[in-house]
Image (cartoon, rainbow, N blue to C red):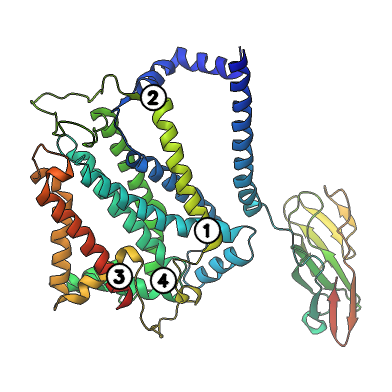
Amino acid sequence: MENAGRRRFLTLCLGGVAAAGAAAGAWPVFRYLAPRAAGDSGAKVKIPEKDVPEGGAKFFEFAGASAVLIRKRGGELAALSAVCTHLGCIVQWQREKQEFLCPCHAGRFTAEGAVISGPPPKALEKLPFTVADGTVTIG
Amino acid sequence: MSILGKAVDWLDLRIGIRELVKTSVTDYLLPRNINAWYSLGSILMVGFALQVVTGILLLIHYVPDSEKAYASVNAIMNVVPYGWFIRMCHAVGSNLMMAAALLHMFSVLFMGSYKRPRELNWLSGFILLNLIMGLCLTGYLLPWSQLSFWATTVATNAAGAIPVAGPYLVEFLRGGKLVGAPTLGRFFALHVAVLPAAMVGLVGMHLFLLERIGISTPPFGQADSRSNRKGDAFRHDAHPGGLPFFPNYLLQDLTSISVYLAIFLAVVFFDPYLFFPKEAFLPANPYLTPAHIKPEWYFLPNYQTLKLFPSELLGLAAQGVAMTLLALLPFFDRGEERHPMKRPVFLACTVGGILLWFGLMIWGHYS
């Protein structure tokens, strides 16, 4: 009985050491494989105003995702997330219609990002921006 | 009954796993005078497994493109969490595996374990050693550093000494006149697919032969150290009354593997750049050859031999003859005696050969 207890104790100790060793090896592997947090999530994106003509759009990467800066007819600017709120496809700017179309399931959004029709459950996310000295700063 | 017990019962019913474990593990007997040198094979298996795992992990972030390779390795080292650890394990592991493979070969040589009926074990082991060297050589280019570029230029250039076909062979190896993007493509394919697949196949053959023929008996501590294999019929070396592999020798295997891992981790953590000269930290520049570029320590004897001979062809031929003799050793060394002290000519040649090899390595290093 004493031997059995001793054996169980040693097995537990060995198991513990093995588990600790496995964890010590698995942690770096997990960290190596894990998607990295966008280190530039707080970073601002600067776009020269002249890059966005009236009625046109400029797509760019913002905080690890696609975003778009548009200049509506009349000259007003808008910065939006370009990720469709339905299934995450990237919306396209319809210059003639002055609206966004998601090519995956024909979701339509206004130039302000509001849903016009189709499956998207909510509007495109609006991004904060400022304009100074001919440069649009998003973020 | 525990879940493990039920799982074993389930497997036993289908594939007779208890019988398999009995014949291959618990009742697989080894000679009573077996020593720690026999665990080098297990060390190499662990070393190879580590190379495969770390290699697969490196593949996730490495970009095999001459324009991006150096930057991707740099990112692995500096940006990817624990990337430095994975890469250092891979780089240090390759060097230590090479050392373990050489020790394995030396121990088999000294104990005469290559002799009949184990000629095929020796031959498959010899080819495995060459595959490890091939893996090291092809892996060396992948970081696309100055060291990678110029060491590969020098190594592939050596083939040019072969008469007639030499220049074409160099071009074929490189995929062009000079080392460049095509070289990286073919070395990458060799390093991650062709050579590891060949390794797995040959390791399987090596283990099959070991299991089928049985473990050799060390010649030490025995009155008669001659080979006891006579006659023409196949016979498994069963070692009646010997030590079971499990648990007895497994404990020795685990001890040796722990020592190996301790050395391995000590290098990784305390001297990770032991095998990295400063050229390894500069991106490849095809227009700027660094001074004193030298191959890895295990290729230094070959490098120095090439320099010593008046012609490169003679140097290559000398190495070819030495390698062929070593590969075919069990086919012409057919004496029954296995104890090194009772084989003075063999002992003198082997010790002389090893000293010459180390001498050339040191000479190559300081030349």
Q: Chain of mark 2?
A: B
Front: mark 3 or 4: 3
Q: Position of residue A5 (x, y in %)?
A: 63, 18
- Disc 3 is placed on an element classified as helix
Q: Residues within 10 Å of mark 3 (few under 14, many from 20)?
A: some
Q: Quadrant of the N terminus of chain A?
A: top right
Front: mark 3 or 2: 3
**Residue B288 higher or lower than B331, as above or below:** below
In this rendering, would B112 be left or right of B175? Answer: left
Which residue was labeled with disc 2? B25
First in sequence: mark 3 or mark 2?
Answer: 2
First in sequence: mark 3 or mark 4?
Answer: 4
Q: Position of residue B221 (x, y in %)?
A: 23, 34
Query: Residue at 57% of width from left, 61% of height from top?
Result: B84
Which residue was labeled with disc 4? B148
Residue type indicated by callout 1: Val
Whether discs 4 and 1 lie on one chain: the answer is yes
Task: Give the alpha-carbon distance from disc 3 to disc 4, as whole Å.
Answer: 21 Å
